[in-house]
Image: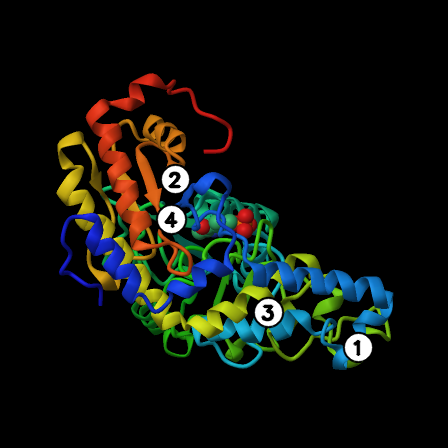
Amino acid sequence: MANTNFSPGLNQALALDQQDPLRKFRDRFYQLEGGKIYMDGNSLGLASKDAEDALLRVLEVWKKEGILMWNIDDGYFFQYARILGNRLAKLINAGENEVIVAGNTTVNIHQLIATFWQPTKERYKILVDDLNFPTDRYAIDSQIRLKGMQVEDVLKIVKSKDGIFIDEDEVIDAMTDDVAVVLLPSVLYRSAQLLDMERLTAEAHKRGILIGFDLCHSIGCVVHDFQKIDADFATWCNYKYISAGPGASAGLYVNKRHFGKPVGLAGWFGNRDETQFQLKHTFDQAPDAIAWQTGTPNHFSMAPIEGVLNIFEEAGLQHIHEKSLNLTAYLMYLIDQNLKPFGFSYNNPTDDTKRGGHVSLVHEEAYRICLALKQHQVVPDFREPNVIRLAPIALYNSYEDAFKIVEVLKQIGEQKEWEQYSAVRAMVT
Ligand SMILES: *Cc1c(COP(=O)(O)O)cnc(C)c1O
């Protein structure tokens, strides 16, 4: 539970940093040049020395071994997707060989929908919400079209009433007899709402519906227990809270009760190890989640995961989650204390059990305020139309960072600094 005894003033921030058990991990990460304060680790986590070392090691192995690298160390690099998957699995408490590292979130959604959505005349709908990250929808819509069906007929969308939060009761009410599969995010990328995956899964299963989750905005920040949640499938990217670098290979989870289910998108790395190199033209499906691998794994996009997992294992996800909640609670406290008169508010759950890892700061001039923040050496994250996401990352952000940002925002508010900037949007916001 987050601390609620906050007080104004820099002294408390410094004291909280002093007592922070994760404090030492900050030095394992490269801070940006010019002393910039980074609050965008939920878009792209910072580089660490651990990630760098692991990446360079794979490069060395390739230099020294060439193709022989597949066979050294008992096939460590041949089994890389499985080995890293089993380490990542601990972050969501998944079982042995239920997680692999492969592809990206989008292609994994294609893979999982192609596998788990097997429409029949009676049960053919896919249930989604209208606040999920758009790529999830693009993938689902194209899977529907690939089957020669109409998106309007197949897709069932639970609409948010306020455009900010999803009402779980409404999702459950929409789980009707014609629904085959549900795909939802664990944490909404804009409002940071954390859905009750265990409850949603139990309700889906009661009705004979399969359910999967996109964990992009919670993996590495929120403790999940997939043995308990018992969802059918999940996927996530590893470049946000996990901090494995741009384009890091993604995670893919398949519940062991589905092992052996024919994979939607088959490829030779999903073949059983023993027969893979016989190169037969009939697919001999691997007996666990490795079956959902397609082609050759992307070692350079996987190595940083190996490095950074050392940090996660040393720090402990429980501590990371606690500090994350405390940092966002502290930010909310400071916003309440300092920023209300200048038109700021926040649209994220205040309840610890319902909040992911960021604060969703709202202001009608959010876009231009982000430009001003950059001028003040703060790296924030803008989301249309009026949201500034502030993601203090437990492993490398401090309470002092949170304090300073609110001080900067106060100054921007007092001086109406946004008036100096154009509201014309840049390409990547
Ligand atoms: C970041 C994010 C993605 C990104 O998908 P990629 O294919 O990895 O680029 C997808 N879904 C959600 C919810 C995200 O937050």
The local secondary structure at tag 2 comes to: loop
Label 4 vs label 2, nearer the camera: 2
Residue 295 lies, in percent from the top left, at 73, 61
Look at mark 4 in the image and give the residue it sits on. Answer: 189
Q: Which residue is mark 1?
A: 72
Crowding at mark 2 (Cα within 10 Å: few <14, some 14-19, many 20+)? many
Labels 2 & 3 near each other (Cβ < 8 A): no
**Dot 3: what SS?**
strand
Instruction: Give the image location of residue 363, x and y in percent.
Output: 25, 32
**Which residue, given by chain and number where applicable, does mark 2 sit on?**
380
- Upstream in sequence: badge 4 or badge 3: 3
Which residue type does callout 3 highlight? Ile
Q: Which residue is painted at 65% across and 64% down in the image? A: 54
Asked if the residue under mark 1 is in contact with the one under mark 2, i.e. CB atoms within 8 Å, the reply is no
Of 42 and 135, nearer the camera is: 42
- Give the CA separation, mark 2 to mark 3: 31 Å
